Amino acid sequence: MLNAVQTGTRDIDGATVHVLADVAAMARAAADEALAVMQAAVASRGTVHVMFATGNSQLAFVQALVHETPAVPWADTVVFHMDEYVGVGPDHPAGFQRWIRERIVEPARPKAAYYVEGLGDAEAECRRYSDLLRHYPLDLCCLGVGENGHLAFNDPPVADFADPRDVKVVELEAACRLQQVHEGHFPGLEDVPAHAITVTIPALLRAGRVLAVVPEARKAEPVAAALTGPISAACPASALRTIPYATIYLEPDSARLLPD
């Protein structure tokens, strides 16, 4: 088993897996790769399209990229995010639009930011955001892995590796909703919305580069399932092994269940 000081790099199917010494080193390495991808896209065509995950697991990475990486070409960056609760507005304290706005858009001042809107006609919003993603093909998708193995809000019951849609309305399973309670975003399970709008797995993995930033001991079981178990919608994050342009960043706590 990996212990608290083991680090290294390995390839697991299509994915490259880095285990860094600690959360700070993991965040720094992921930010460095994100920077390189963003700079290359801007050099190639003058703009870069980036999608970001939200949540506590992304805080160190976003801090490193936004506040500790001065060469990021934010003025040429178009920002997207992955999901939003149905019925939650842009200023809700647990809303993902607010998370992105406060932690990335306001301090970094990108060229543009397109948010998933939780209020209004959810199916119409799926169509609108799908059109945006087709108009702005993603160069980079920076995501996390949920405690139930989800990518964005593609929980095991609704994840589809061949989903014909780019954005859809989903019902959130209890494990996913409990994660939001455990992270302190809602006081109790009954307070977490039961439905959300999410970017689907094929749309996430269509990005030119996919970075998965996955710290914390609570992610050790889904990480092990994703990287050593079957490639199956039973663990949506296992889809990362199906593409040759995914990099997964771990630290010893999240990697502790991986074999040597």
Image: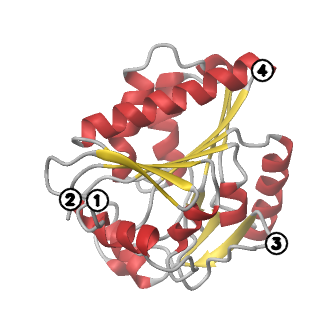
Which image quadrant for residue 203? bottom right
Write down the residue under mark 4. Answer: 44
* 200 or 197: nearer the viewer: 200
Front disc: 1 or 3? 1
Marks 2/1 in contact by CB < 8 Å: the verdict is yes
Three-letter code for the amino acid on which mark 3 is drawn: Pro
Q: Marks 1 and 3, Cα distance to the nearest angstrom?
A: 33 Å
Can residue 178 be seen here? The reply is: yes
Q: CA distance from mark 4 to mark 1?
A: 35 Å
Picture residue at 45% right of the left edge, 36% below the top = 102
Q: Secondary structure at mark 3?
A: loop
Precedes in sequence: disc 2 or disc 1: 2
Give the label, 3 or 4, closer to the camera: 4
Going by the picture, which residue comes out furthest to the top?
71
Q: Where, by quadrant of the figure, is residue 41 drawn?
A: top right
Q: CA distance from mark 3 to mark 4?
A: 30 Å
Question: Colour mode?
Answer: secondary structure
Q: Which mark is residue 164?
A: 3
Distance CA(mark 2)–CA(mark 3):
38 Å
Q: Say which residue label 2 marks.
A: 2
Q: Position of residue 119 (x, y in %)?
A: 65, 61
Q: Amino acid at mark 1?
A: Ala
